[in-house]
Amino acid sequence: MGLIALRTLLIPAFVACLTVTIAGQAGQSVNYKGLEVVATGIERAQNVALIDCPPTTNSQRGNARPGEEFAVVSLSFKVTPLFKETFVKKPVMTDASGKVYNTSVAIIDPGSVSEYKCSFPFRVPTGTRVATLQIDTASINLASLDKK
Amino acid sequence: MDIDRRAFIASLGGTAAVSLMGSEAKADALEHWMEDQLDEQAAVQGAPEKFPTVAELEAQIETRNYRRGTGNVFVNTRGNVKKLAPMPKNPTLQDFFRLRFAPANHVLQSATRALKTGMSEEIILACLLHDCAQALMKADHGWWGAQLFEPYIPEKSTFGIRYHQALRFYADADAGYEYPDLYYRIFGQDYTPPPHIEATYKMLRNHKWYMEPRLVTVNDLYAFDPNAKVSVDPFEDIIGRHFKTPKEGLGNDNSPSAHMWRTLANPDAPL
């Protein structure tokens, strides 16, 4: 009985450890299942290239509407031997008030290239201050990069 | 200006397509391509592209000997049309891809992205077929496409094909769809969709299947890569599972859209 009770306590604790958010500051590397991710910059734009990640040569560009702009987050990726995933969720961005924004850029075949840089545009109301970027359980603090 | 020979040939549909072009058509094509490259370079360098207005596009109508909504099998904007290869006796979807929709690079890229991002097979199929009807008719191609494929594919795929035409005019950041430059360029920067498209959009916003056509538009945007290498082969299983190929062949099965397949098979019929 004692062993069963111990298992009952330890297994959820172990699972909680596995699912804990991996957090990092801007400029610091965050390791997501063997994929090292660094936020390198944020720019604002009205018109952005629509290119998946790792980068392709897609020719389309997207446009913000009046009163909106794109907060374009640049990320640098490094694939380590530990990285085995074939699918990585799209990043989501959170502003200072906690509102979540999605991007149209998808991460496709993330292990196909050893190192790459990608830009993720998020359409936000003009002047929005960004706070964090999340890729599944990995979180990166963007506030210090945002010069808005 | 440096010319990337490989990219230029790819933009024309490959070496086979180029070999069928006359020297004048090739020269015209090269000129168009260089203009496009210059436009892209200007955009990359941060110079805002000057998009035409609706009035400017309308003013171009009488400068052409064809209408912009005409299907690709009926017109060659860069020279004379060529004799088409005959269709097999009992043609399949793959035969139409090979002999009438080719190179079909855009729809293949779109479906490849849907496949790699883990979308449902109904959506992958819708992406694969969403612009194929442009061979027959560009204007209202979503509705034409839905009608063409409806007897053979799942209802959700038909829904996605029909309504991507309306949703493409409306950005949806939550779903990851942005309004593309392409539409400023081809519809005009001051274009507003007509009332029936606006009404369709409002209907779709409240529809339980909203995401079917929306995801077609999402993949549509990312399928304009001149260097992408794609093939219909990865979709053989999905076509096998979801496309009800008639044993008589498309066009010979007396379905409600059989006449559309026959027209695609033989667009040179005078009447």
Image: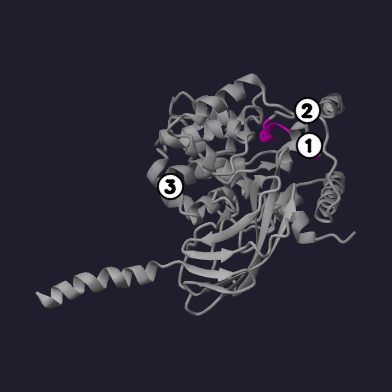
Res. B269 image quadrant: top right
Label located before the other in sequence (3 or 2): 2
Alpha carbons under labels 3 and 2: distance apart: 38 Å
Asked if residue A34 lies left or right of residue B193, the reply is left
**Relative vertical location of residue B5 with respect to residue B106 in this rendering, above or below:** below
Find residue B77 and name its label.
1
Q: At 83% across and 29% down in the image, what residue appears?
A: B64
Residue B156 x, y percent position in the rendering: 43, 35
| Magenta span: chief secondary structure | loop
Residue contact at pointers 2 and 1, CB within 8 angstroms: yes
Q: Secondary structure at mark 1?
A: loop
Asked if residue A44 lies left or right of residue B258, the reply is right
Residue A134 x, y percent position in the rendering: 53, 60
**What residue is disc 3 on?**
B120
How crowded pointer 3 is (Cα within 10 Å; few <14, some 14-19, many 20+) is rated as few
Which range of residues does the magenta coloring cover?
Answer: B71-78
Residue B76 among those drawn in magenta: yes
Say which amino acid is labelled 1.
Thr
Residue at the farthest right position: B1
Q: Nearer the viewer, residue A12 or B49?
A: A12
Q: At 62% across and 58% down in the image, what residue appears?
A: B229
Residue contact at pointers 1 and 3, CB within 8 angstroms: no
Alpha carbons under labels 2 and 1: distance apart: 8 Å
Q: How many marks?
A: 3
Q: Nearer the viewer, residue B185 or A105?
A: A105
Q: Nearer the viewer, residue B206 or B41?
A: B206
Find residue B66 and name its label.
2
How crowded pointer 2 is (Cα within 10 Å; few <14, some 14-19, many 20+) is rated as few
Say which amino acid is labelled 3.
Ser
